[in-house]
Amino acid sequence: MTRNLYSASLRIMGVAGSGAYDATLPKHQGITSILWGTTPVVFKWAPLAVDQLAVLKEVNDNSVDGNTAQDLIVLGGGAWDRLHVYATDEDRQSHAATLKELSAEMLRSQQQNAAVVWLIPTTINSQALNTEEKRDHMREEDMEAMRSVYFKNGVLSASSFVLDGPTFTASRVSESFDGVHYPPQVYDAGAQILMNAIDWLLPLNEAEPVIPPQIGKMSNPMLGFMMLVLVGIGLFMFDGFLGFTYLASAFVKGLKPHDLHRQALRSSKKSSHHHDELSDPEANNVLRSRLAKAKARKRAPKAKAKTSGNMDPEIAALIGR
């Protein structure tokens, strides 16, 4: 169960092939993955409570000796204890004593600034258990009693966070193909719950306070004075290009800004005067009368001499017609 949660967590963190079925690999061994080149994520095979206690003691002792401290520790167990070391009263008493020691070590880990998560065993599909031994000792009702044993011996209260396996597997119990394990997507849900809890499990990194720069620290007095000079040139020399037009006028005549300014004003005055003439009523009347007379001259036909059709041509010539 815990190994599958480990693989699901790696998949969430970008290791796509983590937890893929591979019959050639041994099942019961530790796994070490280095993420992003600097972050080790380690799984240690510890199926029984005594194994978990031994591993956690080793981790805590290494932290005290000055080795790399752990940020997050995820523990889980109970199924193998119920299956292999829970047959007699002596086994049960020894198991309870081990759980109390395990709880103490979990508290010790928290004192060393490590967050400790306990995974409660997932729901068992009793009908799918594939061995007689499992069907006799590891049914769902047996595991429910084992979950209560861990609760009574302080394992859950010694945890920083409890990941409740039955909560995200009870509705998917029919998908447990061997009675114990589930498809990868079911463990993905548990890993997502764990990732959501990391926000308050891990301590916040204290960032150095940001001190804003003082006003004027990035300024340059000389550059500022040069900008004022260029603006003054643009204002008083009528040059929108801050004086660079005078540089162009050295090569092309008639481009000096003051000459261009006078020419623009001259054109503006002519346009304004013409507009004033057109807008004067008396000037408009004079213009209309002149236009009327010109049109009348064009329409008036010139007088032409007419000769009577009955008059003799010779007589007409004598009288001057």
Image: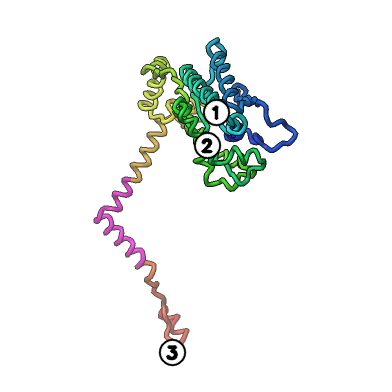
**Residue in the image at 65% along x and 25% along y:** 30
Label 2 neighbour load within 10 Å: few <14, some 14-19, many 20+:
some
Pick the quarter of the image with the C terminus. bottom left
Quadrant where the N terminus is found in the figure: top right
286 in relation to 252, above or below: below
* Residue type, numbered disc 2: Gln
Where does the image place residue 127, in percent across and percent down from the top left?
61, 47
Q: Nearer the viewer, mark 3 or mark 1?
A: 1
In primary-sequence order, the first of circles 2 and 1 is 1
* Separation (CA) of disc 2 from disc 1: 38 Å
Q: Which residue is mark 3?
A: 310
Amino acid of disc 3: Asn
Q: Amino acid at mark 1?
A: Asp
Q: Which mark identifies residue 192?
A: 2
Q: Quadrant of residue 189?
A: top right
* Foreground residue among 262 and 87: 87
Mark 3 falls on what kind of element?
Answer: loop
Q: Nearer the viewer, residue 310 or 22?
A: 22
Residue 212 is a magenta residue = no
Q: Residue at x 39, y 38 (%)?
A: 264
Q: CA distance from mark 3 to mark 2?
A: 130 Å
> Which sits earlier in the primary sequence, circle 3 or circle 2?
2
Secondary structure of the residue carrying tag 2 is: helix
| Residue situated in front as seen by the camera: 65 or 127 | 127
Camera-near label (2 vs 1) is 1
Q: What span is colored magenta in the figure?
A: 272-295
Residue in the image at 63% along x and 33% along y: 15
Q: Is residue 195 left or right of residue 129?
A: left
Q: From the image, tell me which residue sits under label 1.
A: 89
* Residue at the farthest left position: 282
Residue 122 figure quarter:
top right
Q: Nearer the viewer, mark 3 or mark 2?
A: 2
